[in-house]
Image (cartoon, rainbow, N blue to C red):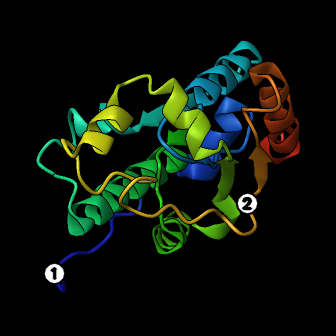
Amino acid sequence: MNNIVSHKFQVDRANRNKLKGHKSFVLWFTGLSGSGKSTLANMVEKRLYDIGIHTFSLDGDNIRGGLNKNLGFSREDREENLRRIAEVAKLFVDSGNVVIASFISPLASDRNFIREIIGEKDFLEVYVNTPLEVCESRDVKGLYKKARSGEITNFTGIDAPYEPPINPSIEVKTNIEDAEESVSRIISLIKSKLEITK
């Protein structure tokens, strides 16, 4: 590590933000599997795209199919999975994009080091607070059924913990509000942070 020297480029994040006409940051969706994170993230990105905001989405299954396909689901591998994702998100923020990240990220300690990597001012936490029984009843991927039968171990919400955020930037409850309402509230939260200039 002593021989690594960061190169300074003439075009920096401020230049890219100016070119794109808005600020860049990370919108991090956390919640149980089946809570609606990816659905909401997709809808938020479409709304932002429609008003000319440059975005990039990072999603758990997609990342594990490529960049992190060599990682399993041990505690150490989960931590490394999130570390890599946070570093990638930070690069995209530097590129001038609003990053929309959807990851269970079950532990407060995980989310804290993600926040440290990305930077407090660039990290907005969206807690998709959907009760376990609702997530399990949806079971879109059939994972809860496998976890209950023992086919999958260390599954968040069943035999591995989920620690709810204490003070998220915004909390949405997909079991009591519809997706459009949740998305509208999220967009309202970030509009001022975007500082749109074009």
Q: Is residue 184 left or right of residue 169?
A: right
Judge the density around disc 1: few (<14), some (14-19), many (≥20) Cα neighbours within 10 Å.
Answer: few
Q: Is 108 above or below relative to 106?
A: below
Which numbered marker is on residue 168? 2
The one nearer the camera, 106 or 148, is 148
Q: CA distance from mark 1 to mark 2?
A: 39 Å
Q: Is 122 above or below relative to 60?
A: below
Quadrant showing the C terminus: top right
Among the 4 quarters of the image, the one containing residue 74? bottom left
Which numbered marker is on residue 80? none
Q: Is residue 72 left or right of residue 163?
A: left
x, y (%) of residue 110?
Answer: 45, 68
Whether residue 50 appears in this view of the structure is yes
Which residue is at the far left? Answer: 70
Q: Name the element at disc 2.
A: loop
Query: For mark 1, what is the residue?
Result: 3
Q: How many numbered marks does the figure carry?
A: 2
The residue positioned 27% from the left and 63% from the top of the image is: 80
x, y (%) of residue 191?
Answer: 85, 38
Instruction: Residue type at mark 1: give it.
Output: Asn
